Amino acid sequence: MVLDSQMGPLIIATATFIGALVGSLTQFFIRRREQSERRNKVRKAIKNEVEAMEWLDREDAFGIGALPKTDIEGLISRQMYEAQAKDIGLLAEEEIEKIVTFYTFLSSTKVLILGYQEEWGSLHDADEKAKRDKIEAHLDNLHEMREELVSELDNRI
């Protein structure tokens, strides 16, 4: 009889412990899935924005001869990058590095092109050629970075 009276509280304690354990594990896996979904949302948003920069796929980018007249502001978008900035830390280090490097290089290329556009017409031929060559090199690097970034994001989605 003494054993029966002690079994009730033991069964209740065991059931409570098991319930708490199941609840905790369920919450853990739900949070983990939500975090995975947030990571994939960031990856997809960045990937879509980077892929939309199709002008980087053209052999001559948007036409180096058209540089003085090109609306570079309209070609370069950072909206998704900026909108997802708070969640970029959820990604793997390799992804973060490629994303930040790409957008940093994109910004420096934009500054280079805008500077060229401001000086266009007042440069000597040699200076103009040097600037255009530098811009072409930047665009080639940007194209390669874009390909690597898209590939990295694709592999993780």
Image: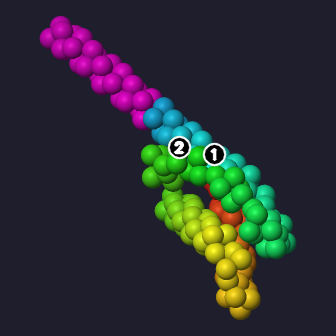
Taking the image as drawn, is residue 98 in sight?
no
Q: Answer few, some or many: residues within 10 Å of disc 2's Cα (few below 14, many 20 plus, some between 14 and 19).
A: few
Image x and y of residue 88, in percent? 49, 51
**What's the magenta region?**
1-28
Percent coordinates x, y for residue 122 in the rendering: 67, 80
Tell me where residue 1 sits by quadrant: top left
Disc 1 residue type (three-letter): Ala
Residue 149 place in picture, x, y as percent: 65, 63
Q: Residue 12 lies in magenta, yes or no?
A: yes
Q: Considering only vertical position in the picture, is 35 above or below 155?
A: above
Q: What residue is at 63 percent from the left and 70 percent from the top? A: 118
Q: CA distance from mark 1 to mark 2?
A: 9 Å
Magenta-colored segment: predominant secondary structure: helix
Residue at position x 71%, y 77% from top? Answer: 121
View extreme (front): residue: 122
Specify whether residue 23 is painted magenta.
yes
Which numbered mark, 1 or 2, is in the foreground of this view? Answer: 2
What's under tag 2, amino acid-wise?
A: Ala
Q: How many marks?
A: 2
State the residue in front, 17 or 83.
83
Q: Quadrant of residue 120?
A: bottom right
Horizontally, is 48 left or right of 19 in the view?
right
User: Which label was assigned to residue 45?
Assistant: 1
Residue at image x 25%, y 19%?
13
Across and down, in percent, residue 6 comes to 18, 14
Q: Are marks 1 and 2 in contact (CB under 8 Å)?
A: yes
Q: What is the residue that sits farthest to the bottom in this orientation? A: 126
Other residues around mark 1 within 10 Å, as few (<14) / some (14–19) / many (≥20): some
Q: Mark 2 — residue?
A: 83
Residue 58 can be seen in this image? yes
Q: Which residue does the image show at 74% across and 89% down from the upper left?
A: 125
